[in-house]
Image (cartoon, rainbow, N blue to C red):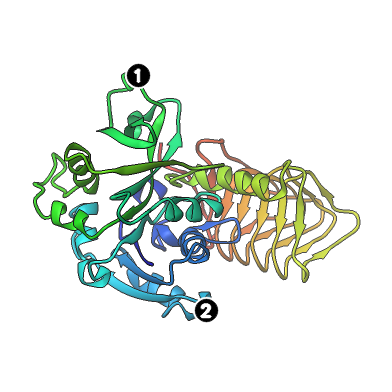
Amino acid sequence: MKGVILAAGKGTRMLPLTERRPKPLVPVLDRPMLEHIVTGARDAGVDHFALIVGHLGDMIREYFGDGGRLGVRITYLVQEEMKGTGAAALLAEEFIGGEPFFMSWGDIIVPPRNYKKVISAFEPGKTDAVLSLNWVEDPYEGAAVYVQDGFVERIEEKPPKGTAATHFNNAGLFVYTADILDRVKTLKPSKRGEIELPEAVQQMVQEGKRIRAVELEGYWSDVARPSAVIALNEMIMQDRYGDARGVYFAPSAKISDDSIFRPPVYVGEGCEVTDAKLGPNVVLMDGCRVEPGAEIKDIAVFTGGQVAKGAKAHDCVVEEGATVPEGAKIAGERAFPKIVCADGTIQEVPR
């Protein structure tokens, strides 16, 4: 099966992490979020992807190349103007070639097992599409999905807060037949001036098409803001290690015996941790260094980042190659983490 991933947006809510990279390349745990999606779908049977790129798309091309490193083929399609998800999907019409295809937004992160669950739910001749769902307290920020006997009965985009009579939200993983694109072509721009793909899905529902609803298992995140990176790291580690008591050290990591860890903690390849206190909820990507006397928690340190002697930091993201200075005390907030930048500055997350 072919796969289409929409990865063209600017990710303005993710600022300042998207000042120098496209949102799909923002790291989550041990790799960019887009790689989580590609490998998850690959393991469920998708072998050829169309990545719809736009903002800083050349960086995505450079990172993924032709896909061979991940055992897949990748075709790149450029969305020159941000005219909506429907317009983005239409770019892949020739790529799809009239066959059923998998689709995902480029910022949805879920446990890998869900990709097979969604793709295997599509049965040619018995289903016209598959729509994934996640349970939320109130789907007012997304799309409220009403389900009857395992199939979508109705979709309501961004209902007023407190009015939805369902807890199901459109989770952003799909299987469609090529017919969806014919419906997209008939759509008029929304109030935002965009062609909205969910409107085509709603049109299918109104026509009586059989859209199977699949509830996802485990964590779900659209990684909307920098705080989501830190929170999602913890959720992924909990899912991987089972009970949140896991501590992972890559084989090449150097850890001193006098270091203290409060799980969950992830330490990547080539990292060095000496006489420091880490955790809970610490991720060190490859090549990071934490020096004696440092204390860190609720933190994501991107590749090559450092935490110098005696520094204390929590609720923050350390950018690639950046350093938390010796003796520094950096205290972010759970919803508004501090961003330690490679140029030595500390940036605030927009409120």
Q: Visible in this render: residue 252? A: yes
Does 153 sit above or below residue 277? above
Q: Visible in this render: residue 298? A: no
The numbered disc on residue 64 is: none
Q: Position of residue 271 (x, y in %)?
A: 73, 66
Residue furthest out toward the front: 125
- Assess disc 2: are there few (<14), some (14-19) or many (≥20) residues with their C-alpha within 10 Å of its C-alpha: few
Q: Nearer the viewer, residue 119 or 127?
A: 127
Q: Nearer the viewer, residue 303 or 195?
A: 195
Judge from the rendering whether residue 19 lies leftward or rightward of residue 207; answer left or right.
Answer: right
Q: Position of residue 285 (x, y in %)?
A: 64, 62
- Tell me which residue sits at (53%, 50%) in the image: 339
On the image, numbered disc 1 is attached to which residue?
A: 162
Does 99 sit above or below residue 182? below
On the image, numbered disc 2 is attached to which residue?
A: 69
Q: Nearer the viewer, residue 176 or 26?
A: 176
Image quarter of the C terminus: top left
- Tell me which residue sits at (41%, 49%) in the image: 14
Q: Position of residue 276 (x, y in %)?
A: 81, 52
- Assess disc 1: are there few (<14), some (14-19) or many (≥20) residues with their C-alpha within 10 Å of its C-alpha: few
Image quarter of the N terminus: bottom left
Q: Amino acid at mark 2?
A: Arg
- Give the mark nearer the N terminus: 2 vs 1: 2
What is the CA distance from the residue labelled 2 to the residue labelled 1? 46 Å
Judge from the rendering whether residue 194 lies leftward or rightward of residue 154; answer left or right.
Answer: left
Q: Amino acid at mark 1?
A: Gly
Q: Position of residue 151 (x, y in %)?
A: 34, 37
- Tell me which residue sits at (20%, 44%) in the image: 204
- Tell me which residue sits at (42%, 53%) in the image: 107
